[in-house]
Image (tube, rainbow, N blue to C red):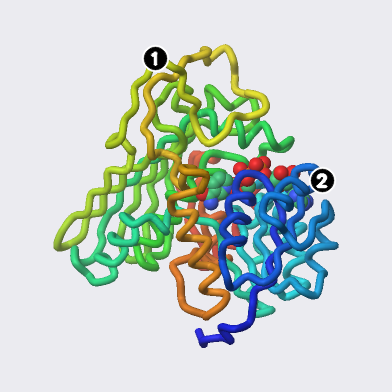
Amino acid sequence: MSITNQNAKIGLAIIGCGDIGQARAQFARSYSGIGWIGVCDINRELAQSVATQIEADFVTSDASELLSRSEVTAAIIATNETAHYAPVSLAIEHKLSLFIEKPLAVDFRQSAELSDKILKYGIDAVMGYTQRFRHRFLVVKEKLDNNQIGQVSSVSARGLLNRTIANMVLSRANDHTNLTPMVASGTHMLDMCLWLMQGSKPKAIFARSTDKIFGSTGSKDTTIAVLEFDNDAVLSINHSWVAPENWPGGVYGMQIGIIGTQGVIDIEDMHRDVILASSQHQPAGYKRPSASIENKAASHQQSRNVDFLTSIPFGQKSQGEMWGPIREETFSWFQRLQTGVPTPHTTAQEGHANLALCMAIDLAAKTGKILEIPDDINELANQFT
Ligand SMILES: NC(=O)c1ccc[n+]([C@@H]2O[C@H](COP(=O)([O-])OP(=O)(O)OC[C@H]3O[C@@H](n4cnc5c(N)ncnc54)[C@H](O)[C@@H]3O)[C@@H](O)[C@H]2O)c1
């Protein structure tokens, strides 16, 4: 990547002013390399309040109005999961550099189309896989890149989410066809495993899912899969988003064990190391859903009095500011835009490959058969829902 003109200021459009868009907007305001900021949300009042808060240069409820402004050179797409396709398509038309929250699109063909167009137009587009910016995983990545445990032969990964998150994700969409635990949240753990496994290519999948809690919504509860790779490495992945609301982990906990020919790396990331216990109820996650849509017969109203304090993976507010990997991830992207330095971000093509593999895992679980992965995983498109 070449070093670009570092004096050129970034003109930034932020589409979607929910929790994540707001956090990134606040970082943008404090980055001196950004000369102009426009914000947009279909909720006009919300857009206006964020614009006021960060002293934005432009505010609108119409993404196309903002993305076609001549000042805009880059865009953050932080709309909810099912509303990425339209603003990303528009931003591609305007050849903007992009930061897109995952997934690229929940519809596989739309995701493939966006990934292809981004490649064709030579657009620098990265995605919000914030876990890559956590110190622990960057250190592990460095050790693996430097061959400190030899060749990786197997990886075992377990992810567990508080079900408040599943209720939130599912309650803000009408169509849950592809909003499975793998597509909506397991993608973070899968991205991490593939990143650490350094280019191993999956060739077959065995998987099973359960659906006692969220089956009635069209989604799933837990998915367990075993993936075989072309270099004979094996990955077992077990992802669940149905821990009860009183589970002390606020959002996402992981355990990843990596076995190499000359060593082992074992990552305990369930966040059990900073624990609060209180007689007061502790809200789970970073926000509550507007409505809980799980099967109530299987759930109970629970008080949550123990909290793993650092279990919101992207970060949390303290002293009026957001701290955590979302900060490193966002500032690192601003530096990438301004100087052209390489960064650990997930590219749009990797993001699309993550979606394809999550959908392939869901397909293998649905058919109950071992799924052979073709050289070009996009050939499975007709089998994805
Ligand atoms: N990087 C991370 O660690 C991380 C963490 C949580 C969520 N996310 C992702 O970030 C995205 C946003 O999540 P959130 O929790 O902020 O959601 P949110 O629901 O709080 O915010 C989304 C906002 O987008 C707005 N919106 C929807 N369609 C729009 C459109 N066409 N034009 C303009 N605005 C539109 C909504 O009105 C809403 O205000 C999701 O894709 C989510 O998966 C990423």
Say whether residue 367 is left or right of residue 224.
right
Q: Which amino acid does label 1 sit on?
A: Ser
SS for dot 2 = helix
Which sits in the foreground, 214 or 321? 321
Q: Determine the residue positioned at 64% across, 34% down.
A: 170
The part of the image, by quadrant, that contains residue 280 is top left
**Residue 53: x, y in percent?**
68, 50
Give the residue at mark 2: 44
Say whether residue 123 is left or right of residue 341.
right
- Is the residue 123 above or below the residue 103 in the image? below
Q: Determine the residue positioned at 42% across, 58% down.
A: 132
Q: How far apart are marks 1 and 2 (CA)?
A: 39 Å
- Is the residue 75 above or below the residue 185 in the image? below
Say whether residue 136 is left or right of residue 132.
left
Residue 212 appears in view: yes
Q: Residue 279 carries which label?
A: 1
Q: What residue type is labelled 2?
A: Arg
Q: Determine the residue positioned at 50% across, 84% down.
A: 1
The part of the image, by quadrant, that contains residue 54 is bottom right
